[in-house]
Every structure is written in structure tokens, then in C-alpha cells.
Image: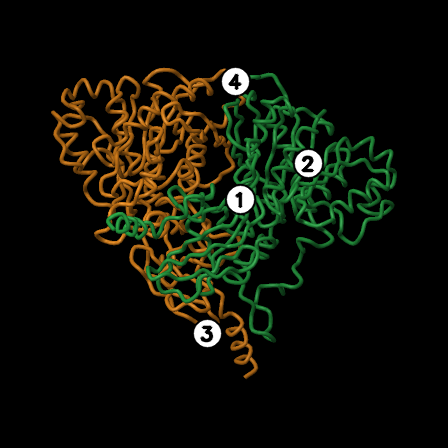
Chain colours: A green, B orange
Amino acid sequence: MKRILMALLLAGSCFAQPAPDCKPSSLNIPGALYPCVYPDRRVAFRVLAPTAQKVQVRLGGAHDLTRGDDGLWTGTIPPQVIGFHYYTLSIDGAVVSDPATRTFFGSGWDNSALEIPEDDSGYYSAKDVPHGEVRQRWYLSKVTGKWRRCYVYTPPDYDSAKRSRYPVLYLLHGWGENEQGWHSQGHVDLIMDNLIAENKAKPMIIVMDNLNAVKPGEDASLFAARSIIARRSLADVPPPIGAPPRPGTTPAAAPARSPFGANFGAVFTEMLMTDLIPMVERTYRVLPGRENRAMAGLSMGGMQSFVTVLGNLDKFAYLGGFSGSSGGRGGFDPKTSNNGVFADAAAFNKKMKVLFLGIGSVEGPGTKTFSEALTKAGIRNVYFESPGTAHEWLTWRRCFNDFAPRLFR
Amino acid sequence: MKRILMALLLAGSCFAQPAPDCKPSSLNIPGALYPCVYPDRRVAFRVLAPTAQKVQVRLGGAHDLTRGDDGLWTGTIPPQVIGFHYYTLSIDGAVVSDPATRTFFGSGWDNSALEIPEDDSGYYSAKDVPHGEVRQRWYLSKVTGKWRRCYVYTPPDYDSAKRSRYPVLYLLHGWGENEQGWHSQGHVDLIMDNLIAENKAKPMIIVMDNLNAVKPGEDASLFAARSIIARRSLADVPPPIGAPPRPGTTPAAAPARSPFGANFGAVFTEMLMTDLIPMVERTYRVLPGRENRAMAGLSMGGMQSFVTVLGNLDKFAYLGGFSGSSGGRGGFDPKTSNNGVFADAAAFNKKMKVLFLGIGSVEGPGTKTFSEALTKAGIRNVYFESPGTAHEWLTWRRCFNDFAPRLFR
């Protein structure tokens, strides 16, 4: 009897603890036990919202949490694919980040996120190997008329090998993210440290900039305005139907320069050529010439990389698109696509040392189809498929881990 | 009549726009018009929460917002003091960050924040001067048994002046913040760039580490667990009154090592001496010796700096406490406080090149009283008071801007 009473007492005192096999997500704030991830990849959430009527976790679909007498809303969602997932809470219709997690800039604002760990995460973990640095660098852009910030990975021996010069990879984030994504969400510095330590990749400089670039006077929030948060709930609530456009605004459906329109990426490319590359080559000990210059990006950053590199083969010899390239947009025609750059396959292959296409297996067949079309047209390319991952950072960590060793050989 | 109709139409189409003299806070996400700040320092907020019963802004006190038919909650709060203010939203009792702002790690989680600008913010703005870098640096700590991350500011000429060596300032954040605070919230890099460009401060290296340091096996969330979010709503909801402590936990009132107890700062100091300083002096081109080493911090980081430096005068010659020092804790006695380090004023003054005490004028008289007590005891010190600011980052930016020029002279 005494033992039963004790068990009841302990059970009662444990009401708010997760099950022992539910491990806090690695992206939680210090001390937060929820969200936690079960071995079968179900995820348990807990949110304090004493007087709310409805609390949901929005991850893929919307998942209702259940209110307890203590004002805590709890729930467990079905197994998720491995990887890094942005998610939000909806609290009586307010879309907010979960205060239990660190936030990560995505979709134009600071989202909460959770990590469903993969079995072998060693390649992006801190190990006892020499570590490089990620350096915050300010520079003034002539093209945009604004101060810009980029981050620059320098390899472990950069400061000690004072006479060495290094090739450079320009590496871009995706839509709604920023120049912090690759080291904050992507752990690119740790991946690179580990590759270099194992002698799998050449030491290189990696420049991570912000995709957003507009001319002075243009709307700087063109990209940001597509954010669900900035557009729907905060900045730009649409006027009532039939009302005239607001003074001083252009109708949302036809911005002056659509981020995905015919001119996609033109200002960024101009900024890269005019401001960023010269600043990098003036500031860091880089090797000159196209064969020491690579560009890659994820999703919209992959699209940007294809636009920039395919239009400037005299400047770049390596190109990577992770879950984003120029494929699938209006069909691929080797004779005419990208201004005919693929028309002479032999000439293209001679210039392009590595053309890399990566994708998560859960994302669909578009990238594979594009790779096959390129191959059929005689264009040498690498197709990399990340097993079991979606359009998220685990796919892109794996893409990078496969791509980086191929560079500058 | 036509003019009136047009005015009405325009007014109607503007319903969701802030007043023209209400400027979006500089900390907003791209494109977000709210929160916005009026010239008289009132602040207007807007939150989409269609089915909520009660929405409040928590900044100082709680301020109710008012629901509109469109599900948007709006409100304007009274004039705020200038500076950087963390704040939260309460949505039907759920304490969350406002999705309209970038988030900043404070109180143990990623808070929303707004900036009430001061008239002359030039000293922490990006100007067309040479810029240094803020470098992310990983290192393995023997004392804590864990990988740690610090950020290292290197001055503009660090890479080009290959033979120069620099003095080092160790600079600490406050309670609930982390190693990103000084450059993210504090703009320390821009302040330093500007001081160096005007020849007001000596080029120096600034090392920004994380205050949290515990021995292997100790509770790593000792500091974090004091977070309102982690403690009350997420990680550690107290068991019902009278219930026994949860298995595997120590009662909250008596942790094994209280962050503010008698041993305050001991593990951090040991980590600093054993791991951080040797790593910095091995990795960067630093000048050796106590006269090239300074330490300062804000709030709890100021307390830590006083504990570390006053216990190790053979290692440091400069000490700064911004809104935090060793004053006011149980009274000051020059003969016995800090193990009697102040007892021989002449000897102390000979060793300590600068003892700096800074505070915001809104914070109360404690620091001034401490400075006067030191002066009365013959201890040379600098008292700096930031006019009209509170316990927040504008006070600390100004403290730093006054402190840095005094170093390494």
C-alpha cells in the first residue's frame, strides 16, 4: 500500500515531465524539455496558454494540442522525417514562434524550429579537430547604396599559414532566410572543419551573403513582403476588396521587379560582381581566376547561383544547386535554355568543372528529371539525392557535404 | 464633394497603416511596419490574433491592445525611455515573442525587442570607415568538458598588419543573455570601428564569451532555469504544493551551486584562466601581460568581471562594470570586501590602471554610492552615468563607448 501511494505521488509529481525516451530537440532553449522527440520520431509539444481556446502546432499541417487543467496545452504529433523543421504555434489564430526553441530566420521572420536527428550527425558536429572561423564582415555596396553584411568562413590554417591563398565558394541561403542560415541552421563551418580534418576537401574560403539586393529607391521588402508574417499579419494587410491601392504602394500582384520574374537575380549578380567579389578579393588571401571560384545555393539561392554562374562562365568553374537550380521552370531545352549556354555541350563541359544538382528524396522528381535531361544533352553533371529528407536544412547539409569535396580539384 | 469622397476612400484604404510620423523600430523584421515609434516615444503595436480574448504587450507593465473587426489587435503605449527594450506579447495568457521583430537572446530565450532611438546614434552606426570583424570561434573546455563558442572582434588592420600584436578586452553579457549579445544587441563592433577611425581608442581584440560555465555533471541549466520561460512555462512547472521534489531533481530553492551564491563566478573564472585565455593567446596575435588585459561586463557580467579581476590582479590591469559590479551586495567595507583587495589603496591604485563603473541614470543610485565609497577609501575610479537610460543595451553601448578609449594607455 505504501509502495502504491509512493508510486502515485511520484506519478503526480511527474505530470509535467516528458516520457524518459522523449529527448529535447537540440534546438531548444537551455533548460526547455519540450519539444521532445521520441525514438520513432513522434514529437511532443507543450505550451502554456491558460486562457486560450485553441492552440495548434503548425508543422506540415495543423495539429491541435489539448488543454490540461493547469493551463498547459500538450500533444504529440505523428512521426516526422529526419532533419531541421521550421514550425509555428497558432494561439487563438495568432501565428507565433514557440518560446521553447531558439529562433531561426526563415520565411522572413524568426521562426521556431526543431531537429529530428539522423543516425549519423557526426559530419556536422563539433569534433576535436582544428576549427576555422566564421567572420562577420560589413561592406558598403555601390549597387544597392546600402551597408551589407556577409559571413566569411576561413579554414583552420588561415591565420597561421600567412602566405597561403585559397579558392572561394560563394554560398547562398534560400527564400526568406538570410546570410546567417548556412552557419546557424546549416553548420557549414563544422562540416567544412571535419572535411578538411579528414583530408576530404581542400581548404577554402566560403562567403555567405544575403540574396536580397535592390537598387536604391526600389522596395527593399520585395522578398520580405512575401513572408506570411510580414504580408498577412503585420505589414501589409490587403485593403478591402474593390478598394483602390493604398497611396504610395504598387498593387501586390505586380511589383516593380518581381523576385521570381524575368529579371530574377539580376541585381544580386550585379552587386556580386561590382561589390562583393572585389571586396572579398581585396580583403582575404584568395586565389585568382575562374577555376578558383565556385557558387552554390539552396532553393532560391540555387536558382540565383544558376542565373549568376551560367551567365558568367568566365568568372566561375563550379556550380551547385541544392533543391533549386534552373530546372523545371518552363521546361528545359538544351539549345535555348539559359541563353543557349548548354547548346555546345563539349564547350560547356570544358569550362564547367563540376555541375552539381542535389535534392532530398522526399522533394519529388524535378531535379532528377533535370539532371537526366542535362545528361541526355551531353552535359556532365553530378546528381545527389539525400535519402529520406525534405526541403530543409538536413538535405542541404548533406548536399554541401557531398559537394565541397568535389571543388577545386 | 468629390474631394470629400476621395478623402474618405483614401482614409478607408489606409486603415492598417501607421500614422506617417510613426517610424518602424529598427529591430523589426524586413517589411514590418509595427511596432512603430512616435517622435514623442510612444509606441504603436499591431498583432493578428483573430480569435483571442485578450492580447497584451508586456513592456514594463502590461498594456492591453484593442481588437478590431479584422482580427487585428492594436494599441499605443505611453512614451518609453530611449534605448533597447526586450518585450513580449501575452496572447490569452501565452507569453510569446512578437513575430514582427527580430529576436534577441535575453532572459534565457529569444525575445522580441524594440529600439527607441536616441538623437545621436552615430557612434554605433555603420559608417564609411575601416571595419573590423567579429569571428565565431569554437574551443573545447577542459574545465566544463564541453565545446564552447566565443566571438572575437579583431580590429580593421588585424589581417593586413601581420606583425602587430594587440591588447585584449574580455567582455561579458548579462544574465539570461549569451555570447552574441555584445555584437547583436550592443553593436560593439561598430562602436569600436568608429572609435578607432577617430583615433579615440587603441586597436584591440575583444573576446565575448558565455557566462554560463559548469563542471561536468553539474546542472547546465542553472542559469537558464531562472528564465521565466524555461522555468514557469516550459521546462520546470513546479509540482503541486506539498508534493515531494521530482525524482532526479534538487529542490529549486537550493540548487547545488547557486548562480548568485558564495561561489558566484568561480567556475567561469577557472574556465577563463584554464581554457579561454590560453586559447586566445595561442590563436590570435595578442600582447602579453596584465597591462594588456582588460575585463568588463554588464549586469551579471559586471559582477563576474569584478570577481575575476579583483581575485586575479596579477592577470588584469583594467576592470569595468556596466550596471553591475560588486557594489551593493551586503555593503562595502574597504578593509574586508573582495578579500581585502582594496585595503591598501595605494597598492591597489598602482596595479589597477582603470576601474570603471557605469550606470543608466534611471537605474538608481547604487553604483554612484559604490563609486563614492571607493573614492572615500582612496580607490581611484571612473564613474560614468548615461543620461535618461535604464537597465538596457543603450546604457551599455554608452558605457562601452566611454570605457574603451581609456584602455591600454
Q: Nearer the viewer, mark 4 or mark 2?
A: 2
The chain letter under disc 2 is A
Above or below, B53 against A320 in this view is below
- Name the foreground residue: B109 vs A83: A83
Give the residue number, with chain letter if any, for mark 3: B69
Give the residue type at disc 3: Asp
Mark 1: few/some/many CA within 10 Å (<14, 14-19, 20+): many
Give the residue type at disc 1: Ile
Give the residue number, with chain letter if any, for mark 4: B162
Instruction: Tell me which corner region of the image, top left, top right, bottom left or bottom right, holds residue B183.
Output: top left
Q: Nearer the viewer, mark 2 or mark 1?
A: 1
Give the residue type at disc 2: Met
Q: Which mark is residue A17?
A: none
Q: Which mark is residue A295?
A: 2
Q: Is residue B259 left or right of residue A72?
A: left
- Residue shown at the point (50%, 48%) measured from the top left: A113
